[in-house]
Amino acid sequence: MQIAVSGGKGGTGKSTIAINLAIALRNYFDLTLADLDVEAPNDHILLGIELQNEEPVELFMPRFDYSKCIKCRRCAEVCEEHAIITMRDGTPFLMPTLCSGCGACRIVCPVEGAILEGKKLMGHTYLTETPYGFQLVTGKLLEGEERAMPIVVAAKERAKALNKELLIVDTAAGTSNTVSKALEDSQLIIAVTEPTPLGLHDLELILKLADIMGIEAWVVINRSDLGKKEDVKELARRYNARITAEIPYSENIIKSYVEGRPIVLSDCGEAEIFRKLAEEVVSYLR
Ligand code: SF4
Ligand code: SF4
């Protein structure tokens, strides 16, 4: 089974919901949490742990053997990313930052061995034991790299390979193709929002995406007392999405960040909200 914690807008507290929900759900399922917000993963920070078991994520990158190249320019012509430029005499040169690793240049090259297999490091995945009885898989894109998809795919595969009863994915903000990839195979999307005009706008995008992908969506309103939550409720109604939790702005939650101790482990009212949300997820999945 797989559920996703997502949200159109960054900074809504998506990761806070993901880690606290994972801790609450560990009492019901053998689970893995996957942080697929690969440009800025922070579940490990909120869990107060250091990332471990690093594995590189590499892509194919062409290397030219100029002793064999006949300067026919076909590699440059086929490259949709315009990552290969040719000199006046047809000698090809690669601009590595533009290369997507598709391999088309190697396929069309008429000379065997003129294009060799090079590797480009895109980022890493990590597998970290948490003190809460589940493992965290994290994808992290290399700084300066723009192509997040290979990291999302690699991290998700690493998490799935653990073969646990439940996979919880924490996606990036927005509705890009990497978010869709992270959401794929989910039975439920928990869309986290806040009752502001921007939060509302981005919530609509994620609810539309859930609708297109045919996935049940629930809405969690974070900092629910800091805006017009009636508007969120109206929007959720339009998309048949249930409001499953309202979390008020809370000093306790801020304190839990500072102390590196997830709020769900305490006895306050906010912790109870997460425990109730977990119970709703359990009844939905079982
Ligand atoms: S691997 Fe693809 S993107 Fe990279 S240079 Fe070759 S054709 Fe272009
Ligand atoms: S397709 Fe092969 S032979 Fe032609 S220019 Fe590119 S590397 Fe050289």
Image (cartoon, helix red, strand yellow):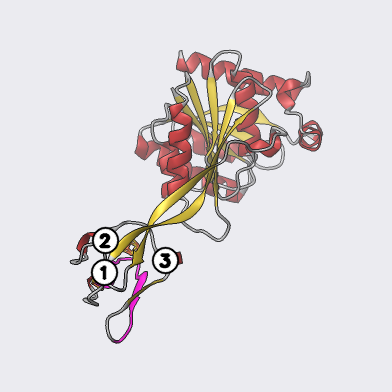
The magenta stretch spans residue 85: yes
**Residue furthest toward the left?**
110
- Residue 186's disc is none
Q: Is residue 220 visible?
A: yes
- Residue 98's disc is 3
Q: Nearer the viewer, mark 3 or mark 2?
A: 2
**In the rendering, at what x and y percent does residue 131 appear?**
69, 23
Q: Residues within 10 Å of mark 2 (few under 14, many from 20)?
A: many
Q: 22 or 241, which lies in front? A: 22
CA distance for labels 3 and 2: 16 Å
Residue behind mark 2: 106
Which stretch is magenta? Answer: 75-88
CA distance for labels 3 and 1: 14 Å
Identify the residue at horizontal 26%, vertical 69% (top origin). Answer: 75
Report whether the residue tagged 1 is closer than 8 Å to ligand 2: yes
Q: Is residue 175 visible?
A: no
Q: Of the residues under marks 3 and 1, which one precedes in the sequence?
A: 1
Residue behind mark 1: 75
Among the 4 quarters of the image, the one containing residue 184: top left
Q: Is residue 240 above or below residue 10?
A: above
Q: Secondary structure at mark 1?
A: helix
Can you say which quadrant of the picture contains the N terminus?
top left
Amino acid type indicated by mark 2: Arg
Report whether the residue tagged 3 is closer than 8 Å to ligand 1: yes
Q: Secondary structure at mark 2?
A: helix
Report whether the residue tagged 2 is closer than 8 Å to ligand 1: yes
Q: Is residue 7 above or below residue 167?
A: below
- 171 to the left or right of 212: right
**In the rendering, at what x and y percent does residue 10 appear?**
60, 48
Q: Secondary structure at mark 3?
A: helix
Contact? badges 2 and 1 (CB < 8 Å): yes
